[in-house]
Structure formats: C-alpha cells, structure tokens
C-alpha cells in the first residue's frame, strides 16, 4: 500500500487519530521553556487576546499561565485535535478546518510554535503567514528554525522565513531573536507592528 501524499491537514489528523502527540517539541524541557516564554510575554505586554495558529494537542497550553481575563483561541488543521481540545479546555475557544473564522486584526498577539517547518507547499506556507500576521494588531511570536535547509523529513521543510516576512510584511519588524534552548532546536522570533 502506498503512503498518502503529505498534506499538513491529512498528516496531523491521521497522527492524532492514531493516538500520537504533537511531538517532542511540546514535551519535557522544550515544552516547558516555550510555555514559560509565552506566559512571561503575555504578562509583560498585557496581552488580553491571543490566537495560536497550530495549537496542537495542548501540552504547551496546559503549562501557559494566562492572566485572568485573557482570552485564548487555538486554531489547528486537524479537526480531530480541535474536538479533543474543546473537551479538555472548555474555557478556551478552538477552531478547525470546518469552522468559520473572521481573524483580520482580531487579536493583540498571534503565536506560531513549531508550525512553519511543517509547511512544504509554498501556497500553504504563504497563506499561513498571511493568517499569522493579519490576525494580530501588536505582536507576533514565532518559534521555529530559520535555516534554508529544505526538506529534512517527510513532514519537515526548513526555510529562511525571516527573509520572507521582511519582504512580505512591511508594517512589521523583528524586535527580538532568542537563542535556542540548545543547539539544533528552534528559537523564538518576536515581531512588533512598526510604530507601536
């Protein structure tokens, strides 16, 4: 039997239906680091609305400390995981591929963690960047690798995404780049709206 062609929605929905997790980046020390960084950022910048583009299985969300009154929306290509997250985190909002979502300028902050390198198709990748940046009014926080290595696994395609963002989103600027937790891992890249 041949392996189905890779699409993010197909791959992740099958993965979650098979009982697998979002992966090592959401677990252990790396998952805890990501949650602590996002928690601190939200508190420091008084973020009251946040959208997480590619929320996954909730392992990181479970560790994020959201201040009282901060609303969280998780979006994912897998309807399977979205339905699970609605049960697991009833206080938050989750949207999947079957849900209508008006996102333009709707959130103070948008998050992307471990997603960009899972988008090998240019159209999916650029559509995702459009959603990520057009949904936020103040902050965009990305956790990813920024290397032009191309495909390194069936579901991994690494790009120099900072160049694409600089060319495509002129009203956003890269404010901060954090070192990786350890060599070979992804890093945080923090963007802010120009003039804010």
Image (cartoon, grey):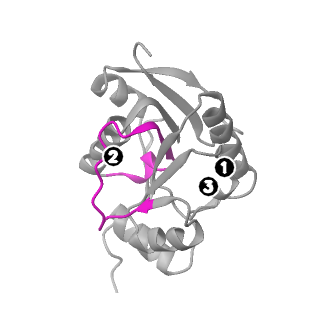
Residue at 32% from the left image edge and 75% from the top image edge: 4
**Label 3's element?**
helix
Q: Position of residue 140 (x, y in %)?
A: 46, 33
**Dot 2 surroundings within 10 Å: few (below 14), some, or many (20 or more)?**
some
Q: Is residue 64 above or below residue 195?
A: below
Q: Position of residue 50 (x, y in %)?
A: 49, 43
First in residue order: circle 3 vs circle 2: 3
Q: With 95 as the anchor, is 32 left or right in this view? A: right
How far apart are the alpha carbons under marks 1 and 3? 5 Å
**Residue 128: assigned label:** 2
How far apart are the alpha carbons under marks 3 and 2? 20 Å
The tally of labels here is 3
In this figure, which residue is indicated by the disc labeled 3? 61
In this figure, which residue is indicated by the disc labeled 1? 64
**Dot 1 surroundings within 10 Å: few (below 14), some, or many (20 or more)?**
many
Q: Position of residue 102 (x, y in %)?
A: 28, 49
Q: Is residue 154 visible?
A: no
First in residue order: circle 1 vs circle 2: 1
Residue at 71% from the left image edge and 39% from the top image edge: 181
Residue at 36% from the left image edge and 35% from the top image edge: 133
Q: Is residue 38 visible?
A: yes
**Label 2's element?**
helix
**Quick one: 34 or 62, which is closer to the camera?**
62
Q: Is residue 157 above or below residue 160?
A: below
**Is residue 105 highlighted in magenta?**
yes
1 and 3 marks in contact (CB < 8 Å): yes
Q: Which residues are magenta?
A: 94-120
Quarter of the image with the C terminus is top left
Q: Is residue 92 above or below residue 71?
A: below
**Quick one: 101 or 155, which is closer to the camera?**
101
């Amino acid at each position: 039997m041949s392996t189905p062609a890779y699409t993010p929605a197909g791959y992740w929905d099958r993965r979650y239906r098979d009982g697998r997790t979002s992966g090592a980046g959401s677990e252990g020390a790396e998952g805890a680091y990501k949650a602590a960084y996002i928690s601190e950022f939200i508190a420091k910048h008084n973020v009251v609305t946040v959208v997480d583009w590619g929320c996954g299985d909730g392992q990181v969300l479970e560790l994020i400390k959201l201040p009282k009154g901060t609303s969280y929306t998780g979006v994912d290509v897998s309807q399977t995981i979205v339905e699970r997250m609605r049960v697991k985190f009833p206080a938050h909002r989750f949207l999947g591929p079957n849900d209508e979502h008006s996102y333009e300028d709707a959130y103070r902050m948008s998050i992307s963690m471990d997603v960009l390198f899972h988008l090998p198709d240019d159209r999916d990748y650029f559509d995702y960047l459009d959603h990520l940046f057009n949904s936020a009014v103040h902050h965009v926080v990305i956790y990813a690798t920024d290397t032009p290595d191309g495909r390194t696994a069936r579901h991994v395609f690494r790009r120099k995404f900072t160049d694409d963002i600089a060319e495509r989103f002129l009203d956003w600027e890269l404010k901060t780049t954090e070192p990786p937790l350890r060599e070979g891992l992804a890093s945080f890249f923090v963007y802010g709206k120009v003039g804010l």
